[in-house]
Amino acid sequence: MKYAATRPYAEPEKAARRILEIANAVEVLQGRIHIEKVNETFLFRDGGSPAEYGAGMKLVIERGWLVMHESGTFVIFTAADAELFA
C-alpha cells in the first residue's frame, strides 16, 4: 500500500513564509513586485498547489506583510514585512 507524501506547503503558515521569501528575492520594479514572478516560482518551481498558494497569499495579506493592488497584478512590501527581513 502506498501512502501519500506530506505536502511541504500544506500548512498556510509555511506557504506564507515561502511566498515572502520568493517576494524578497524578486527584483522590485518601481516599488512593485509583479505577482506572476511569485506565483510562477511557488507553483511551478516549488511544486505548490493553487490551493496552497491561495491560502498562503491570503495569510500574508491578512497579516499585513504584503499589500495586493486592486488589479491583482502586483504586490507591495509593507513596514511590517521589513521587520521580518531585517
Image: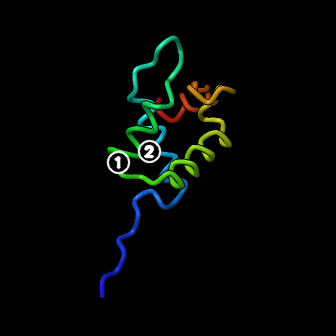
Against 70, residue 54 (above or below) is: below
Q: Identify the disc placed on residue 75.
A: none
Q: Earlier in the sequence, mark 1 or mark 2?
A: 2
Secondary structure of residue under mark 1: loop
Instruction: Point out the image quarter for the N terminus.
Output: bottom left
Q: Amino acid at mark 1?
A: Asp
- The residue at the far top in this view is 30
Q: Residue at x 56, y 32 (%)?
A: 81
Would you name the residue on which mark 1 appears? 46
- Residue 61 is left or right of residue 20, and the answer is right
Q: For marks 1 and 2, give the CA distance.
A: 9 Å
- The residue at the far bottom in this view is 1
Against 17, residue 9 (above or below) is: below
Q: Residue at x 51, y 11 (%)?
A: 30
Out of 1 and 75, give the one closest to the viewer: 1
Asked whether the beta carbons under mark 1 and mark 2 sit within 8 Å of each other, the answer is yes
Color style of the picture: rainbow
